[in-house]
Image (spheres, rainbow, N blue to C red):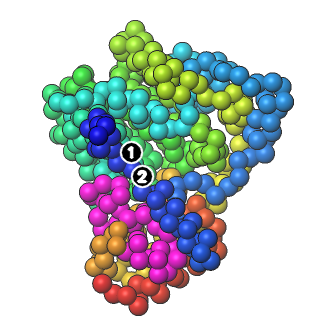
Amino acid sequence: MIQTIAGFDRMGEENAFAVLARATALSQEGRDIINLGIGQPDFRTPDHIVEAAIKALRDGHHGYTPATGLLATREAVVRRTLTTTGVEVSPESVMILPGGKPTMFAAITMFGEPGVDILYPDPGFPIYRSMIEFTGARPVPVPIREENGFAFSAAETLSLITPQTRLLILNSPANPTGGVTPRSEIEALVKGLEAHPQVAILSDEIYDTMIYDGQAHTSLLQFPEIRDRLIILNGWSKTWAMTGWRMGWSIWPNAQKSANLYDKVRKLAVNCWSCVNAPAQYAGIAAIDGPQDAVEAMMRAFDKRLQLVVEGLNALPEIHCAIPKGAFYAFPNISGTGWKAKKLASALLEDAGVALIGGPDFGVLGEGYLRLSYANSEDNIALALERMKAFLEANPA
């Protein structure tokens, strides 16, 4: 019998896609399913972005591109980064990748191996832990607590660092909680990291434009004292409704001060995906440099839905929902219902026709919570809340 390396047996999955598959199967059977599980905007990619890709194809951009991405695309990311963070980076530190996950894969495999620790948020995006376990490193969860506004605690995070810690993963605005870590907490973390110069940082900022109540996003790029060990993950998927385009970018430390991490990920690209397709990169330039009206309209819609979701969830029996501060997720506390989270999520899908994700799919500390994506219409959200209310009233645990 053939054998594979143990890392593949340790690899986990992202259960949102399993829920999507089940919801799709039920829909094909004729069931009326409202999907509040999948984490993608329910808006079309803006027309000017689509047209840029079509023009690129018609202009003959059909071939390979550099493994690091077209210079013009990287320069667009530089302009966007300066606008959003006030920080100027070099295009030679920007990598264009086929989505956000390749940055996670590159960073985690670059630092992970048996005998080292990697810290990651719990509850958090499930691929963090999956890839840590794949490398054989020890996954160390950083608790993300409701009582802390679903922000990470600098003091608690720093207390988990040991001489074996090699990488710290951060995410704000956060999936699945919608939490946003305040600048004061980030400043405290950066100050504390001075005592741990061996620890690299991967900051997942894919939801950086999706913040409510007039708050401002604090990028880790704004702290030069950690710049030589900081990797930024970002991309087009969420902000411009381009999930299916598979377009991400990352910003890496300067080569002279970082064991040349950028060249290492360039080699990974050459060995793995070669390059990102040319038309998508021209679309990415149009997204960054073109009108942002569609982004602003999408965020106004999300803001309205947020209010509807929070009010509706807090009206359900024995459910409490904190107000999300970012992204497009609510993370209601369902512990008062007596239901286990994954069992309730499954029952709501099968019996009420509402697709949600159980909190434990995002980590051990996700028990007692559900993730609800409000990337759906107001009418569908209202109907889903009605179905959830009827189910909970008819099915006490």
- What's drawn in magenta, residue-wise? 344-373
Q: How far separated are the C-alphas under marks 1 and 2?
A: 7 Å
Q: How would you rate the neighbour count of disc 2 (Cα within 10 Å): few for under 14, some for 14-19, many for 20 or more?
A: few
Q: Name the residue under label 1.
A: 127
Q: Which residue is drawn at 69% across and 27% down?
A: 278
Q: Residue at x 52, y 77 (%)?
A: 353
Q: Residue at x 41, y 77 (%)?
A: 347
Q: Looking at numbered disc 1 in the image, what kind of residue is underneath it?
A: Ile
Q: Residue at x 28, y 79 (%)?
A: 338
Question: Is residue 89 in view from this perspective?
Answer: no
Q: Is residue 185 above or below residue 395?
A: above
Q: Mark 2 points at which residue?
A: 14
Q: Position of residue 35 (x, y in %)?
A: 55, 67
Q: Which of marks 1 and 2 is nearer the N terminus?
A: 2
Name the image quarter holding the C terminus. Answer: bottom left
Q: Position of residue 45 (x, y in %)?
A: 70, 47
Q: In this view, does 244 lie above or below 191?
A: below
Name the image quarter holding the N terminus. Answer: top left
Report helix, strand or loop for mark 2: loop
Left-right relation of 128 to 251 = left
Question: Is residue 259 in view from this perspective?
Answer: yes
- The answer to whether mark 1 and mark 2 are in CB contact below 8 A is yes
Report helix, strand or loop for mark 1: helix
